[in-house]
Each structure stands twice: as structure tokens, then as C-alpha cells.
Image: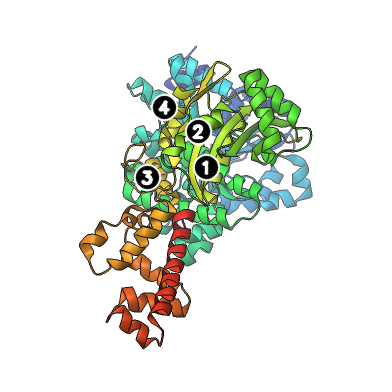
Amino acid sequence: MVTTLGQQLGELRRRVFVGRDEELTRFRDALATSGVIFLHGPGGVGKSTLLDTYARLATDAGRTVLRIDARHVTLGPDGLPRPGGDRPVLLIDTYELLAPVDDWVREQYLPSLPADTLVVLAGRHAPGPRWRADPAWRELLRARELGNLTPRAGRDYLALQDVPEDARDRLLQLSHGHPLTLSLLVDAVRRGCDPRTLADLPDVVGALLALLVDQAPSPRHRDALEVCAHLPVTTEDLLRSVAGDEAGPLFAWLRTLSFVSEGPHGLFPHDIVRDALDADHRWRDPAHYARLSRTLDAAVLARIHATADRRERLRLVIDHTVVAGARSRVTTCRTPAPTMQAYVDELRDGDRAPIIAMTARWQGQEQAGHVARWLDRAPEAFQVFRTPSGEPRGFAACLDLTPDDGGDPGAAAMWHYVQQAPPRAGERVRAWRFFLDRDHGQSSSPSVTLFVACQTLDNITLGGTAWTLIGAYADPELWAPTMDNLDFWHAPSAGYTVGGTHYPVFAHDWRRTDIAEWLTLVHDRQSGTPTRPTAEPTTGVVLTLPAFTDAVRAALRDLRDPARLRENPLQGARLLRRDEGRTLRDLIEAGTAALPPAAAELITRTFLHPGTTQERVAASLHLSYNTYRRRRDEAVAGLTEWLWEREISGS
């Protein structure tokens, strides 16, 4: 019979307790023995709730229970009572607060308890090195990390809370199964909210941060937390891009936090802490959030470019994609599937048959025939997604398009489309023609994540590309929002049909929105800054080499006529759009400085700072006028070549 309010609360909590089957089984087994269980995990993960259940199980088993919360005791030897009765069970919650007397607990208090005592210590931190260094404690201590609820347990909890079924998966995704977050989200739903991200619930985010994140000692420590939340993994050198010389001490401080873990590549926070910090930062100070995001994105990009190994480059891109995706409101960008140790590799002997087989299964024999022909014609275009054991689990192919389409309607349609602004000498047209996962087709899978990473790495590292087209997806409604977010517009006239399936094509012209502009655009969309809509550009100029050459000559003639110079076609060229602060004259001066001294002097005295006629310039240089004109034209050609290289390469 329930006779007190406390009993009523306990009964209600028991009704909604779900999961933790393994922890409960281990505790029931431990009740038959003695020893110490060290339960650790971040705040809000359910340690106290589990201790409530342990207390009930121990009582039901006839054992005497003593429950202690370290928040309510005085630090020191006299602050911990001794359990009484036969075969007592001692439960100590919030053990991290006893850190100052941890040595005394380990060396004196616990050893003084009766041998048949079962002890559970529950705190945020794992046992310290002195627990692990003692061979006797290693034998007696059972450390258990308490993680988030499994998806099944989370759904059971939401069902018990009468949450509508169509909202359950979304709440699980937002909470990562973190019990406290899940409970706060349930409360928000009951208040009539329909959250799509944590940023929709500032009050929930505030409550989480108050519990999960201890007060940072200074604004610089808060900055370090925000860096750690923004990056996939934080290293001291990446932190230095924001914190400068303070990076070392701040990195050491991050390592002490209970919700920050260490991996082979750096530090990373608990998922829900990352999401809460990010949502709070974005809501509280959007301008600072955008600046920090831009700084860190630049640091990550520099690291990618400085990394020679392609597999390591892809890992960096994948990590960044996964973290950025969690902040996106675009469905197909959000929560990319983990790669499950799958990796990208080049084509090997033995891959042909499984690649053709998975294509025939998912997309039919006609498409499989095109794959087979491209495997023969351009094997270097194929990238294979392998399981940890090395077998192909998926593949993609990015073709360098030419007029010779090999009888492929997809390649033909995409090549025809780009003729509206055809590639110039030295420029490439990159076309992602095929993509599949063996088990999931084009649905969410490790292969999708790897495919996106391959596209991103191709975009940011391959110079000299005029166009990138993505014509591998068969579901335009599913993928159009993602492509739109990435500034790839839908190009209906480039679409094609194979085997009864229509494949839409999405396009991007790098000469009219180059990689620097694109990265800024994608970053701004990610951080919530208003941007222009995605559409086939009507601005920007794509000049052929002859037209470019004529424009350089005209610019040199018109350097002293600002009105005519403003009308020069180079004003809309990529090499000038890339740096809004640089004028056409600045660019010509930079190119002139890069020429050999004699050629630079000719350009300077003839065009940049003409003090007299060209005939007198020739005479002052002790040259015949014909020789002067020939050398002047050679210098102009050298300047044009320098400028053209930057227009083509985008650097």
C-alpha cells in the first residue's frame, strides 16, 4: 500500500523505468557476492535512477541498504557513515564530489567495511589511475560505464509516456537516447511543442547545460568548450587556431571534463553535450557562432590540404560531414549513417563482377551494361566502398567527360548540357555517373556517407574543374534538397533515362561560383546566415582564351580610363571575383611583378606608369621600335599567361 508521497513518486518512477537489462543482470549476480561496482557516466544518463532500482532489488533480496548522496555529506573521513546489518549494500551517488578524499575512500574507508558488503560507487568520472594500478583493486573492482538508452528502450519509454508514435524516432534522434534529454523533450511535447532540433527549445538546452557542463572558469574556457562542440575531434593545434598560446592549458582542462572523451585522433564531447553547446551558442550569439565556425572550417580545410594520404583526408571530411549534418535541417544531410569501418579504395582485380551484379540487382541490366563499359574504358574513375574485410559493399564513379561518351546516354546528356558554357583548354568536367550500396541501394547506408565525402573531397582538392555534375541519384525528391543546400542546381535538360528509370542531374559551374565562394556559401547556410538562392547563375563571365587575351590587352590600354576599365569583361571573371577587395589594376600589377625583370619593366613603363610615347620608351631602352614592340607583345603574352593560369586553376 502506498502511504507516503515518496512511495507514490517511487511507484511512478518504477512504471516508466526501461532498459538497462545488462546492468540489472550484473547487479542481481553481484547480490550473491560482495565487492565494489564503479558505475560512471555523464550527468543525466540515469545513474541515480539506476541506483534507485538497485536499492529496491537489494531490499527485495533481504539485504540492508544504505544510500548516500555525496552532495549531502561533509567532505572528510567523518562524512561517510558505515553500513550496518548483515550483508549490507552501500550505494554512494555523485561520487565525483568525493574526489578530494578518493585516496582515503580507496585505502581506508572501503577496506574497513565488512567483507560481505556490496558497494556501488556512481559518479561522472571513471576510476582514477590509482584504482587501476593496484592489482588487488583490479581483481575486486568492476567498473561499468553507463551509456544512453538503446533505441528499443527509448521507444519503450516514449510509449509509456504516451508520445505519438510518429514523433518517437525524431525525439530519439534529438536526444541520442540520453535519458534526461528524452524526459525534457517529452515534457516539451506535452506543452505543445514540436521540436525539430534542440535549438527549438532554448529552455531545454539551458537545463541540460546547467547539469551537464560545469561552469567554465573563464570566457576562454567557454571558447574552448565551444570549439570542442563544433569540431568532430579537437586537437591542441586546432584549438590553437582560436586560443593562440593558451591552447595548451585549455586543452589540458578539456581532458579533465567528465563529458569529454579521448580517441585516437583527439578529444570529443558526449553527443548530447555537443548538441546542447552548439544549440546554445547558435541561439545566444549567432554572430560569434558564425565567426568561430568560419575560423574552424578554415583550419580543418588547411589540415585536409596538408594531409598527403587520401584515406586520412577522407576520414577528416567524413568526420566533419557527420558533425555538420547533425546541425542541418535538410533531411538527407542530417545524421549521416556511420561508416562502420567501411572505407574507400581504388578498383582492384575481382571487383568487376560484384559491382556489375549489384548494379543489375538495383538498377537493371541496361545500367549494368553501362557500368561494365566504363569499367573497361575508365577504371580509374571508380571508387570502391569496402567492408573491413575488404569485400566491395558499394561503389561510385566520377567520369572526366569528353565528347566521346562511349554510347552512354547519361554521359552524353551531361556533356551536351555543359556546352552552354563549355570547358576551356585545361579545364575538366567532372560527372558523378554511378553510385550504389550493395545492401541498401541509394538509401541511407555507410556507402552514402562515403559517397558524399568523396564528392566533397573532389570539390575542394581538384583545381582546374569547370563543371561538376551529379547524375547518379535516381530519386529527385529525396536528393534535391541536399543538392540545393550544396548549391548544385537542378538541370532538367541534363537528365537522362536508363532502363525505364529517370536520373536527374544537378550541376555547379566552378568558374561562376568558385571553391572559395562555394565554401563561404555552404558555411553561411550551415550557420544560418541568409544567402542567395541556388539557381543557375546569370552573373559571372566565362571567357574563352582568345576573348580573355583580348580583354587583357584592352585592360592594359584602358588603365588610365576608369569608365572603360569598369566595362572590361575581366571584371566578371573568376580571378577577380575571388577577391572583392582587389581591383583589375591590382591584379595586373601583381602579374607584372611575377614576370622576369625586363618584361616587368616593359609593362610598367608602357602601361602602368607611362611617362611618354612608346617610341621614346623604346629609345630609352636602346631598342629599335620593332624590337621594342616584339618584346612588349611577349611581355603582354607572359602577363596574359599568368592571369589565365589563375583563372583556370581558381587559385
Residue 76 location, x and y as percent? Answer: 56, 51
- Tag 3 residue: 524
Residue 152 location, x and y as percent? Answer: 58, 20
Residue 168 location, x and y as percent? Answer: 47, 20
Q: Quadrant of residue 499?
A: top right
- Tag 1 residue: 429
Estimate how packed mark 4 is, as few (under 14), some (14 to 19) or many (20 or more) residues with alpha carbons within 10 Å.
many
Estimate how packed mark 3 is, as few (under 14), some (14 to 19) or many (20 or more) residues with alpha carbons within 10 Å.
some
Spatial separation of the CA atoms under disc 4 and disc 1? 47 Å
| Label 2 secondary element | helix
Spatial separation of the CA atoms under disc 2 and disc 1? 9 Å
Residue 29 location, x and y as percent? Answer: 73, 26
- Tag 2 residue: 414
Label 4 close to label 2 by CB (< 8 Å):
no
Spatial separation of the CA atoms under disc 3 and disc 4? 28 Å
Q: Nearer the viewer, residue 224 or 629?
A: 629
The relative height of residue 55 versus residue 301 in the rendered view (above or below) is above
